Image: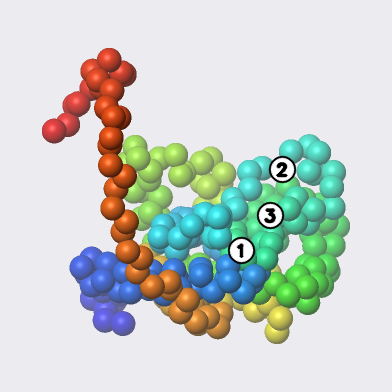
Amino acid sequence: MAKDNGKPKKMKRKTYEAELAKLEVELVKLQGWIKEKGLKIAVIFEGRDSAGKGGTIKRITRRLSPRVVRVTALPTPTEKEKSQWYFQRYIPHLPSAGEMVLFDRSWYNRAGVERVMGFCTDEQYTEFMSTVNGFELALVRSGMTLIKYWMHIRDEVQEDRFEQRIHDPRRRWKLSPMDLEARSRWVDYSKARDAMLVHTSTDHAPWYIVDANVKRHARLNVISHLLSQIHYEDLTPKPLNLPPRQKAGDYQHPELSALNIIPAKYP
């Protein structure tokens, strides 16, 4: 990767869009294969706030059918969910046959934010670390493919992205007091991440580390790697012949001016 003044040189947008278009064609082929063969694919995205998880997921899904490829991003657990077995709230969101589910954060909240922010007890954290590998092994043994990505960014990259969110009203909703608190506990999060990656990267469900310091590069690299992890074949149907439109006969269009037409503010 070319560098400029010690920083990676960002791929030009035209090149990026061209490469993304090629990968999108392959994602459509993968989607068809998943549906046809009844595969169950679960993909986990974890990383620091502003690491680009959501943006990467959007690029994966934007040309795909939500009936086959869906996204799960769970909110803060309710009081009822807090009383359940920890993994219980995630189980209903796991893929059925013919589905791929992309988790924008996952059960690894317990090893990250909950651990650092004190939202779980030491006993709950220890129990999670003791059982998560067995839980994932059970998923894999059931026939599910589990792929886990950690989006890695440098300290200064996160700071730049936070500044962009602060000054851009379109992005400010992405920045919460919790994000700022996490920023102030950078080292604590680093220690929690290190322990999580070492303990939970297994043969049946390894972690894959993504250099996410340049968004365009990260998105292409994740999609390319995801495609490489699942054997698929091209089941794209042949082009269809467009039939002639039915003749109008005695049908007449209604007068549109009598209906509620939205104002034309733009030509």
Question: Which residue is labeled 1 in the image?
Answer: 99
* Relative image position of residue 70 (x, y in whole percent): 56, 56
Callout 3–callout 1 Cβ contact below 8 Å: no
Q: Is residue 261 found left or right of 187 in the rendered image? A: left
At mark 3, the secondary structure is: helix
User: Mark 1 or 2, which is nearer the eye?
Assistant: 1
Residue at the front extreme? 249
* Residue in the image at 86% along x and 57% along y: 123
Q: Classify residue 67 as left or right of residue 236.
A: right
Q: Residues within 10 Å of mark 2 (few under 14, many from 20)?
A: few
Q: Amino acid at mark 1?
A: Glu
Q: Determine whether 46 is above or below 261 in the image.
A: below
Q: Nearer the viewer, mark 2 or mark 3?
A: 3
The picture places residue 26, in percent across and down from the top left corner, at: 42, 75
Task: Tell me residue 240's x, y (percent).
Answer: 35, 65
> Is 45 located above or below residue 253 in the figure?
below
Which image quadrant is residue 189 in?
Answer: bottom right
Q: Which residue is mark 3?
A: 93
The disc label shown at residue 77, or none? 2
Residue 156 left/right relative to 99: left
**The N terminus sits in image quarter:** bottom left
Q: Of 86 and 117, which appears nearest the observer? A: 86
SS label for mark 1: strand
Q: Quadrant of the C terminus?
A: top left
Instruction: Give the amino acid at mark 3.
Output: His
- For marks 3 and 1, the one nearer the N-term is 3
Kindly report the distance in space between the C-alpha atoms of the residues bearing marks 3 and 1: 11 Å
Question: Is residue 4 or residue 170 the one in the foreground?
Answer: 170
- Element assignment for label 2: loop
**Precedes in sequence: disc 2 or disc 3:** 2
**Residue 104 visible here:** no
